Amino acid sequence: MSVLVTGGAGYIGSHMVWELLDHGEKVVVLDRLSSGFDWAVPPEAPLVVGDVGDSELVASTIREHEVDAIIHFAGSLIVSESVSDPLLYYENNTCKTRSLVATAVREKVPHFIFSSTAAVYGTGGIEPVRETAATVPESPYGTSKLMTEWILRDTAAAYDFNYTVLRYFNVAGADPKGRTGQSTPGATLLIKVAAETALGKRPFMQIFGDDYPTPDGTCVRDYIHVSDLVEAHRLALERLRGGGGSLVANCGYGHGYSVLEVMESVKRVYGGEIDVRISGRRPGDAVAIVANSDLARSAFGWQPRLDNLDGIVSDALAWERRLSTKNSSR
């Protein structure tokens, strides 16, 4: 049996593929390569280039590779873009996932893990938020993910189908072994952008708003190392295969850092100054959101190993340097 990883040529997806391969799984990747890269997919994992909304392609891939589980990352993820183009997000994140789930049900794939987001909560505050908190997303991105959660809930109630939704917080860092990392041009993730700026790939670092009701006026987020995150997915899959029922769980460390605190970490790890400029708030950004991940820890034994902001930044910088070498060799 194989695991189908959608979006497996992208940032988190490629880490997921390596995590599964490292633990003896057979993996097949489905990615349309709109923001991912074929070179990011390990040679041991067949790459099918296509869209998750193509039900015939998905069905044939499931049958050919004897897929018994799907881990779904493919989708759009820029909050501000979702505000300016909401229909794109409801198409890519909700409608196409509905098609993927329908195909999984028809092809009798029993296990499904969905990449959701803390954006379903909206602004949660400094106190860690539990899965039982109200879901009041402040952007079409968050709403598109929440709608997909509802689709999974109702599907599991009607069919022989179990799922795990992992709502994760701000993913950062890169594979400590240097095999993959965030490589998308024009990325908007804070630590990725800061690493690019430190290494001269961007002329300055832009911070969107310093007038939020937080200790230093900048947004607060719970930053989770990508390797810890994909381990949570693998453990969640083990739980489903072992007979565990459907579940929604947070993935985060339970404490937050402001944007300015992250910038201080980047400067500390990089060993130099960075040109930081303040601009106005960005549409759709929540003030603060921090995870309570007790459920993930208790339900499938997740124990994060890389909860250290400077370590996350160090891995991101190392990958950014490696990526420069990759690009210059092409």
Image: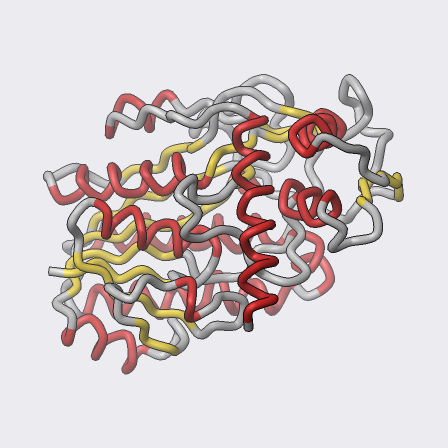
In the rendered view, would you say 213 is above or below 42? above
For the point 44% across and 39% down, the residue is 167
Q: Nearer the viewer, residue 78 or 89?
A: 78
Quadrant of the image for the N terminus? bottom left
Is residue 76 shown left or right of residue 130?
Answer: right
Specify whether residue 255 is in view. Answer: yes
Is residue 279 shown left or right of residue 104?
Answer: right
Image coordinates of residue 33 in percent, x first then y, are: 47, 72
Judging from the image, the colouring scheme is secondary structure
In the rendered view, would you say 70 is above or below 47? above
Image coordinates of residue 47 in percent, x first then y, are: 32, 72
Image coordinates of residue 221 in percent, x first then y, are: 62, 30
Image coordinates of residue 25 in percent, x first then y, are: 17, 52
For the point 18% across and 40% down, the residue is 238
Quadrant of the image for the C terminus? bottom right
For the point 54% across and 48% down, the residue is 319
